[in-house]
Image (spheres, grey):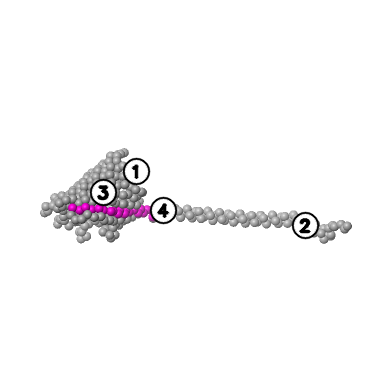
Amino acid sequence: MKRMGLTGLGVATVAALAWNAPVMADDMVEDKLATMEQRIKYLEERVASQDQMIVEKEGEMAALSDGWFNSVEIGGAIKVELIGESPAEGDSGTRTNLRKVELGIAVAINDEWGGEIVVENDDGTIALADAFLTYEPSGGGLSAAIGQQTLPFGVYDTNMITDPLTKDLGETAYTSLVLGGEAAQFGWTAFTYYADEEARIDGFGAGVGMAMEGDASAFGVDVVWISDIGDSGGLSGMFDDDVPGLSASARGSVGPVSAMVELVTALDADGSNAEPSAWSAEAAYGFDLMGREATLAIAAGGTEDAEAADLAETLMLLGISVGIADGVGIGLEWKQEEGYSADDADDTVTVQVAAEF
């Protein structure tokens, strides 16, 4: 048998590999190191890019947190009613009514200036109700509002679906300048308004108020005088000359029980036998109804010399309202009113679903 062994060429090859092995190992190490350095450089560049993106995103978030929309508040109300009527004259019946659609936008322009716009439906058409600027100096205690707004003549608070007769008689809204201030428990207001665009100052008024509040009780009174009550919505055009008016209201609460009373009246109507007035009184009790907030209220009101304003002579109300979800409530009200020349009273039952946001 032949023995196998290395030829001369094989021996030379093995010798060459053995001789060059350290050199090849060094080359491989250097290649790996170069590759690792490139990889580390790539990772460093990627981390730096990510850090820059994070900085940019944080800047964008900061800009968003200071965005204009954070200074804007939007609110509104939608009230829909089902009404059953039993008039003193005529046939009884039921109907639906879109009582109110209102949308308001309030904006804080800066630390001292703000603005508000309110639009609402008026007999099926959208109308501008309020549009005014507000100014409150940083020192506090004083405020001013200028633009189209409801004047601070009367309070007209109620827990009922039906507005009080005092509001029907005395609510006044014009382009106006309203100033106000408060100190401790006392406050004051002064205003001028422009009912006649051709007049520089068409009307003015002033009022004072007091409010006290304890842990479970509160009390407040307001008295406001106006130079011409004939500029109010209820008495518009009733007088030929200026007839001053007065509104006075008091309200208080102890625990779940609250009450309020209000009077709006004309004063010294020279040249006229009519001095219209309206009053309202209301008591309410708040309680829990199957885990929901509820209010039971009873109210009464009346007018004198207000037949020309198409207001009821007497008014009785009984109602209950319950919150059925956040921002949504349902109310049930019975109303009985009697006109000046009516032989009997009109009875009305109203179910209202109201959403406020």
Sequence-wise, the earlier of marks 3 and 4 is 4
State the residue position of label 4: 66
Amino acid type at image mark 2: Leu
Sequence-wise, the earlier of marks 1 and 2 is 2
Residue 152 percent coordinates (x, y): 24, 50
**Residue 154 or 109: which is nearer the viewer?**
154
Q: Measure how far apart labels 4 and 2 are at the Cα level.
A: 72 Å
Q: Which residues are magenta?
A: 69-88
Q: Please tell me whether residue 158 belongs to the stretch shown in magenta.
A: no
Q: Secondary structure at mark 3?
A: strand
Amino acid type at image mark 1: Met
Q: Secondary structure at mark 4?
A: loop
**Residue 218 or 107: which is nearer the viewer?**
218
Q: Measure how far apart labels 1 and 2 are at the Cα level.
A: 95 Å
Sequence-wise, the earlier of marks 3 and 2 is 2
**Residue 99 or 333: which is nearer the viewer?**
333
Q: Measure how far apart labels 1 and 3 are at the Cα level.
A: 20 Å
> Do labels 1 and 2 touch, CB within 8 Å?
no
Sequence-wise, the earlier of marks 1 and 4 is 4
Residue 109 badge? none
State the residue position of label 1: 290
Residue 23 percent coordinates (x, y): 74, 56
Q: Nearer the viewer, mark 1 or mark 4?
A: 1
State the residue position of label 2: 17
- Tell me the crowding category of disc 4: few under 14, some 14 to 19, or many 20 or more residues within 10 angstroms, Cα based: few
Amino acid type at image mark 3: Glu
Residue 333 badge? 3
Sequence-wise, the earlier of marks 4 and 2 is 2
Q: Measure how far apart labels 3 and 2 are at the Cα level.
A: 108 Å
Residue in view at x 28 percent, y 39 percent: 254
